């Protein structure tokens, strides 16, 4: 049973560029949440997608956007990259009916902005 | 209101000892309190979770103690092993909510 798959694993981008990160949820899960984890910090909620719509957004600017496809996979897009966007980006999947039953996380995409 | 405060920031325990990590919250609307374990280069993995209608939950060597009146909960790792060396995050979420609030993490090192 495949868990959450994220790609790429590592990425280096230049300030001002745009980046797209991808996530395939665990089999049977239909909800995808994205988190940003700065070095030495806990994950911070970016947004959650269910039924191809954004259900809730954390305290992140509009430069952060996302998408969910009919097969439940998801993308995180970040425009106009800043040095401060350097972080580990985590995708987590869950069952919408079990939103309070914990996530399954992927291993993340390490984004470095130079 | 939305924060979960976690302590200590780091912890060193001898093999076979008890590791204790504490968390506190303010928002009484939180009703689900998971703990996640994260190894370097990996995403967090759900370890154990509790709801506020019970005061303790045990799964193997891992126990959550929950004090609703004090708005505090803690993770106890009994018979700590070197393989338990990782970063541990407490977290909280609300019934019907869509996001989970994480603590800042505790780096645990178990000395052999």
Image: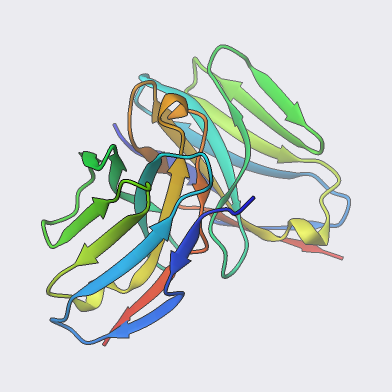
Task: For residue A57, say whether it is visible.
Answer: yes
- Indicate the quadrant containing the C terminus of chain B: top left, top right, bottom left or bottom right: bottom right
Judge whether B110 appears above or below B50 on screen.
below
Q: Residue at x 60, y 31 (%)?
A: B49
Judge whether B30 appears above or below B54 on screen.
below
Q: Position of residue B104 (x, y in %)?
A: 45, 52
Q: Position of residue B73 (x, y in %)?
A: 56, 30
Closer-to-camera residue (A86/A31):
A31
Q: Position of residue B76 (x, y in %)?
A: 71, 38
Judge whether A93 appears above or below B83 on screen.
above
Closer-to-camera residue (B73/B38):
B38
- Indicate the quadrant containing the N terminus of chain B: top left, top right, bottom left or bottom right: top left
Q: Position of residue A68 (x, y in %)?
A: 28, 50
Task: For residue B108, say whether it is visible.
Answer: no
Closer-to-camera residue (B31/B68):
B31
Q: Quadrant of residue A90?
A: bottom left
- Identify the residue at the far front of this view: A70
Q: Residue at x 35, y 19 (%)?
A: B29
Judge whether B87 appears above or below A8 on screen.
above
């Amino acid at each position: 049973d495949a868990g959450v798959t994220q790609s790429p694993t590592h990425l280096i981008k230049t300030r001002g560029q745009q980046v797209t990160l991808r996530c395939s949820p665990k089999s049977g899960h239909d909800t995808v949440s994205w988190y940003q984890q700065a070095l030495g910090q806990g994950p911070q909620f970016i947004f959650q997608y269910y039924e191809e719509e954004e259900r809730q957004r954390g305290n992140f600017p509009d430069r952060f956007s996302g998408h969910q496809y009919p097969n439940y996979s998801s993308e995180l897009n970040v425009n106009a990259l800043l040095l401060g966007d350097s972080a580990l980006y985590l995708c987590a999947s869950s069952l919408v009916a079990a939103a309070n039953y914990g996530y399954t996380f992927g291993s993340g995409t390490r984004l470095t902005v130079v | 209101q939305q924060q979960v405060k976690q302590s200590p920031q780091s912890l060193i325990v001898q093999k076979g000892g008890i590791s204790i990590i504490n968390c506190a919250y303010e928002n009484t609307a939180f009703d689900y309190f998971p703990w996640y374990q994260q190894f370097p280069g990996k995403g967090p993995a759900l370890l154990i979770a509790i709801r506020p209608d019970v005061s303790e939950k045990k799964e193997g060597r891992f126990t959550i103690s929950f004090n609703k009146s004090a708005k505090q909960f803690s993770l106890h790792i009994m018979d700590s092993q070197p393989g338990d060396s990782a970063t541990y995050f407490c977290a909280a979420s609300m019934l019907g909510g869509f996001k989970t609030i994480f603590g800042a993490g505790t780096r645990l090192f178990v000395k052999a």
